[in-house]
Image (cartoon, rainbow, N blue to C red):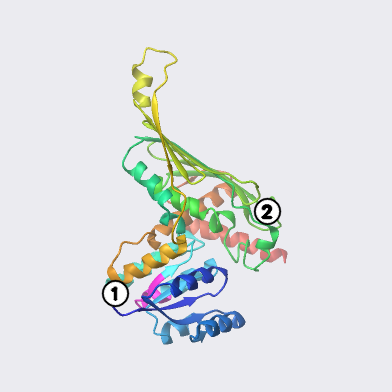
Amino acid sequence: MEQVKLAVIGTGEMAAHHFESIVTNQNVQLVGVCDTNRERANAAGSNRNVPVYYDYHELLERSGAGAVVIATPHFSHTPISIGALRRGIHVLVEKPIAAEARDATAMIGAYNTGRFHYPTLVFATNFVLRARDLWQRVRQIVAQGAIGRLMRATWVVTDWFRTQAYFDSADWRATWRGEGGGLLLNQAVHNLDLYHWLFGLPSRVRGFASLGKYHDIEVEDEVTVLFEHENGMLGHLIASTAESPGTNRLEVVGELGRIVVEDERVTFDENQSATSKVISSSTDRFATIPSKRSVVDLRHRGDPDYKRIFDNFIDAIQFGEELIAPAVEGHASVSLANAITMSSLREKSIELPLDEEEYHELLNGLIGDLDGKT
């Protein structure tokens, strides 16, 4: 089968992972690299003996690429993706797919239009945690109803520790204009994606986001969130880039038991009776429900997460394989991040689906206020 001709747009830190995946995939031919930073682009092209471009429009028109990897700052994901999809070029875009839900909606619209002309068009995103056996197992347990009707999900994920040097490494990082947010869009967006993937979108969000609490940055570095679902389930997210040692623990509680995910292990406590049944029918005022515990160690082994996502992208192009992380599902995590930010700044709960234009105006106001101070 003919190799997929692929180009990489953006040659910074994340691109290094994609170049590693390209080298180890015999079904891919790298045909170009692109970056507005000429020195970085030249180095990437020279190291791999491929043409170099400084403008993505030129790459899309002249490189002959049938697929692109987009590893650029968040706001540029939208125009580059749309430009590629309109030409029938397959896209693997870094997370988040966009900084704003409004932009994500436009990207999905371009993809749907593109599919009308190019039915096999592939649009994927790099939500690497979906590739892990650990999270696929949790999703299987929840989807099969093994813990019954969901009651609560609580995720403490404070192991996203970052130093000031990290945020100072690029002028676009941790700014409203350059990144559109902080912890929610750049680190915990993985957790927001998994939350939606496991439990669906909530109907209401109340967020508390601290801006530059522990770092000299404009955007949030600590977040606490309450999610309310139509079926009565409550969700909680506590995230930080300032705690060490951090915690990464998810508890999922249903009427038939509990799942705890921590240290790459899934602990499943399966009740002998549903809590609702015992609550309503037991004559014992202090009744307890016997449960059976099973523990599965799903420590990550084998290929790196990013390689699994990349290889899956190529297999989707060549063989029609189902995507692990479809980019259209990336809209949910962006929408949640935007809603949490709006909730915190407006000091009120935000109903979903998000009013995308209202959030756009809010973000523009944040950018304008800071521009006015400089």
The vertical placement of 84 against 194, above or below, is: below
Check disc 1 and report the residue beneath it: 118
Instruction: Give me the disc on residue 359.
Output: none
**Screen quadrant of the C terminus:** bottom right
Q: Position of residue 35 (x, y in %)?
A: 55, 79
In the rendered structure, the answer to whether residue 132 lies left or right of residue 156 reads: left
Residue that appears at 38% across and 50% down = 136
Kindly check if marks 1 and 2 are in contact, taking CB atoms under 8 A apart as contact: no
Q: Is residue 157 visible?
A: yes
Q: Quadrant of residue 215?
A: bottom right
Q: Secondary structure at mark 1?
A: loop
Badge 2 local density, few (<14 within 10 Å), some, or many (20+)?
Answer: some
Based on the picture, tell me whether residue 211 belongs to the magenta stretch: no
The kind of residue tagged 1 is Tyr
Q: Position of residue 345 (x, y in %)?
A: 60, 49
Nearer to us in this view, 143 or 72:
143
Q: Is residue 354 visible?
A: no
Range drawn in magenta: 83-91
Nearer to us in this view, 325 or 96:
325
Marks 1/2: CA–CA distance: 45 Å
The kind of residue tagged 2 is Gly
Residue that appears at 39% across and 60% down = 325
Check disc 2 and report the residue beneath it: 212
Residue that appears at 47% across and 43% down = 265
Q: Secondary structure at mark 2?
A: loop
The vertical placement of 240 against 231, above or below, is: below
In the rendered structure, the answer to whether residue 99 lies left or right of residue 273 reads: right
Q: Position of residue 61 (x, y in %)?
A: 42, 85
Badge 1 local density, few (<14 within 10 Å), some, or many (20+)?
Answer: some
Q: Earlier in the sequence, mark 1 or mark 2?
A: 1
Nearer to us in this view, 254 or 259:
259
